[in-house]
Image (cartoon, rainbow, N blue to C red):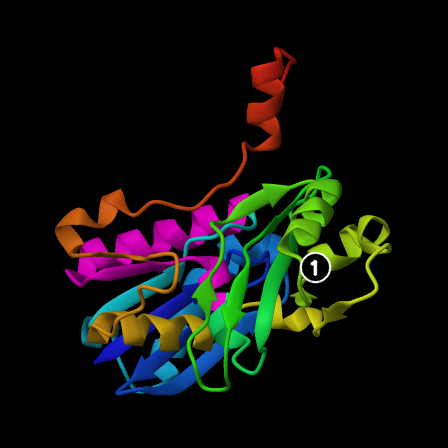
Amino acid sequence: MRLLAIESAGGAAGAALLSDGEVLAEEWIEESLAEGRLLVPLIDRLVARAGSRPSDLDVVAVDLGPGSFTGIRIGVSIAKSLSFALRIPVIGLDRFDLAAFQAGETLGDFAPVVDTRRGAVACAFFRRAAPGEAAVRLSADLSLSPEELARRIEESGGPLTLFGSGVEACREALSRFTDLRFAPAELALVRPGTVARLAALVHSGRDLSPLSGHQILDSSQSDALAPIYLRKTAAEERLARGSPA
């Protein structure tokens, strides 16, 4: 099985090609604002470098978010188009499930936290009981203010590890906690290879019920692939308030 994975929910973008459980190639673009212009040529390059053609692909997978509105929209659109054009299934994955999978050495209760701007962060809470075990979800994906996150942590009542770009955005609200642990922020920056590996497990039929859920659709249903947005865009919020766009 040859699986193409697309990651663009975090602002930057990239892709990976996996075959029979092994990541053959992975490439990353640091220029977040240019991802729409550069992501398709990157995918073409990646597939060619692995000695393949688009017609050799069996599955395409994508990070559905939450995260960058623009990045999610671009990644999901490309995944839908490839699924439809190549007549292959498409797998959509939750960004926080991906972050939990990527943070495989993080034990106990933990939460990836992403800065979504405009005074809010997105996060989800997980628990991993022992090394090598899958993480279990303790919450749905959440959009919270820093103070709401602090209250949620108080209610949890136990040791907690946080990581991701949202930690810095919540630094003041979190300063009253003395028992929080912090892992490197990079753990929440999902790599394309992580998308590929988790999508391969989904495709294999492995029971991933402890996680939030995923979408797997055949090519005739690919247009139903749904991005994960936890809040309205800035333009939608202005429209709801009756302010000019």
Q: In which quarter of the image is residue 213?
A: bottom left
Secondary structure, magenta segment, majority class: helix
**Residue nearer the viewer, 25 or 124:** 124
Q: In this view, does 98 lie above or below 106?
A: above
| Percent coordinates x, y for residue 162 in the rendering | 68, 65
Q: Name the spot of residue 226 as percent of width and height, x first.
A: 34, 45
Q: Residues within 10 Å of mark 1 (few under 14, many from 20)?
A: many
Tell me: residue 176, above or below residue 229.
Answer: below
Q: Is 84 within the magenta?
A: yes
Q: Is residue 57 visible?
A: no
- Secondary structure at badge 1 equals loop
Left or right, residue 10 beside residue 95: right
In this view, 40 is above or below 69: below
In this orientation, which residue lies closer to the viewer: 24 or 49?
24
Q: Name the residue under label 1.
A: 165
Figure quadrant of the N terminus: bottom left
Residue drawn at (18%, 62%) of the image = 86
Q: Give percent across and percent down for residue 119.
A: 73, 39
From the viewer's perspective, tell me whether residue 13 is left or right of residue 156.
left
Question: Is residue 215 shown left or right of residue 71?
Answer: left
Q: Please report the residue visible at 46 percent of the width from the left and 80 percent of the height from the top.
A: 26
Magenta segment includes 153: no
Residue situated furthest front in the rendering: 157
Query: Which region is colored magenta?
Result: 69-98
The x, y position of residue 225, in whole percent, is 29, 48
The kind of residue tagged 1 is: Ser
The residue drawn where x is 59% and y is 67% is 109
Q: Nearer the viewer, residue 16 or 146?
A: 146
